[in-house]
Amino acid sequence: MKTLHFDCFAGISGDMALGAFVDLGVKPEELKAELDKLGVPGWELNFHRDQRCGITGTSAVVETGELNRGHHEHGRSWREIRELIERSGLGAGAKGRGLAIFSRIAAAESQVHGTALDEVAFHEVGALDSIVDVVGTAVCLEILKPDRISCGEIELGGGTVLCEHGELPVPAPATLILCRGLPVRTGGFNKEMTTPTGAAILAASVDEFTAAGSFRELRTGYGIGKRKLDKPNVLRLSLRQSPGLSAGALPGGESAVIEELTLLETNIDDMSGEELGFFMEALFASGALDVTFTPCVMKKSRPGTIVSVLAAPRELDALRRTVFRCSAAAGFREIPLRRFSLKREETEVRGDFGTARKKELFFEGRPLRFKFEYEDRARLARERGISLEEAERIIHQQSPINNGAVNNNGVTGNDAAGKVHD
């Protein structure tokens, strides 16, 4: 299993992450070509070799021009940034990762300022250089496609930081919120070492926070920080081969994805159907990968419900809080498990119906089956006053179906009538 490990012994920022990715092997030309798909002029991304306390790595510098100076001063809203990413020509994976990172920052800023999520105005993080940092990181993760992302303890730094809100102690309020539930330390440096952008990258991307483990190092990259300090101001990224199950030895071969997840369960016998429905929504909003309800019989022959929540380790703290805050549960149990699944690619298809997302599964390196996103089919059906089946047929007829992939009925893409079920 290929693991990407963040070693944040000197913290993390967006530019340090980009430098480390390039030092690890991401081609600058490929990264820049993807970032051009944002469709925003007035920036340049340059990389150069540099050194901190004898450690050599790559420094990333985003330079912005006069066209974006106004936005740099006044910031962009979460709505503006979301629309910028959504309407860009980026691939679905990079869009999803970029939006996930920015949504973390938006939620933190919303809490700090007590404002509605869509009205949150980013200042430092809303500047074009930070947008390039975040989306660039999302692109790099899509290029590398690790099976798993891990991280050790995060150095936050110390002292004070001067930001749009004035001079504040480290960590800044948004950084502190973004690091909730994550392993952190302070005091190793007398400067801000982890920025809100860096914290959001970790919070949205890391599958497991751990410093221990057995692995074989494949490649190492260092991202150089801007400051020259008495200790190395660098971010280390490692690409590792972790022991355990080998994807190539499992059904699906290289198309297999193995994830270390946690199953959180609790039995409830005193909540109404409406309350359980609200509870499920809250669990998904807190980061659950899946939530299921199973009827059961509890003590004294009372009917009850087993609530099962599948989660990545990074989301557990938020989900634990949600269980106690939004349900009648007095406790829960946690079971570590390993999930094996096929690799999936999401692409967008376009026609006179607009845009529809296509999800395709791969088995043993070949396309297996696909389906079009329900929300996109339902939107078209509502717009034209037609059935869901007819909307699906229209999307399918106008979409290039590649490589003889089969749909959920087992029919090849070239012959399929477009009948795909969720």
Image (tube, grey):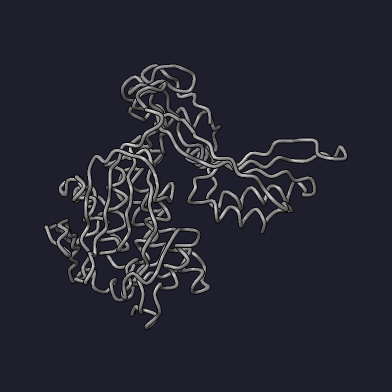
Most extreme residue toward the bottom is 166
Residue 76 in which image quadrant? bottom left
Q: Nearer the viewer, residue 40 or 310?
A: 310
Q: Nearer the viewer, residue 296 or 164?
A: 296
Count of numbered badges drawn on the protein: 0
Residue 417 in which image quadrant? top left
39 displayed left or right of 243: left
422 displayed left or right of 160: right
Quarter of the picture containing the N terminus is: top left
Look at 53% across and 43% down and name the residue there.
Answer: 289
Residue 238 lies, with reference to residue 369, above or below; the image says: below
Q: In x, y percent, where is residue 103?
A: 44, 58
Residue 115 lies, with reference to residue 7, above or below; the image says: below
Q: In x, y percent, where is residue 90?
A: 30, 46
Q: In x, y percent, where is residue 58?
A: 16, 56
Look at 43% across and 16% down and name the residue there.
Answer: 411
**Looking at the image, can residue 275 be seen?**
yes
Look at 48% across and 23% down and name the residue there.
Answer: 408
Q: Nearer the viewer, residue 385 or 39?
A: 39
Q: In x, y percent, where is residue 51?
A: 14, 62
Q: Nearer the viewer, residue 67 or 133?
A: 133
**Looking at the image, can residue 351 be seen?**
no
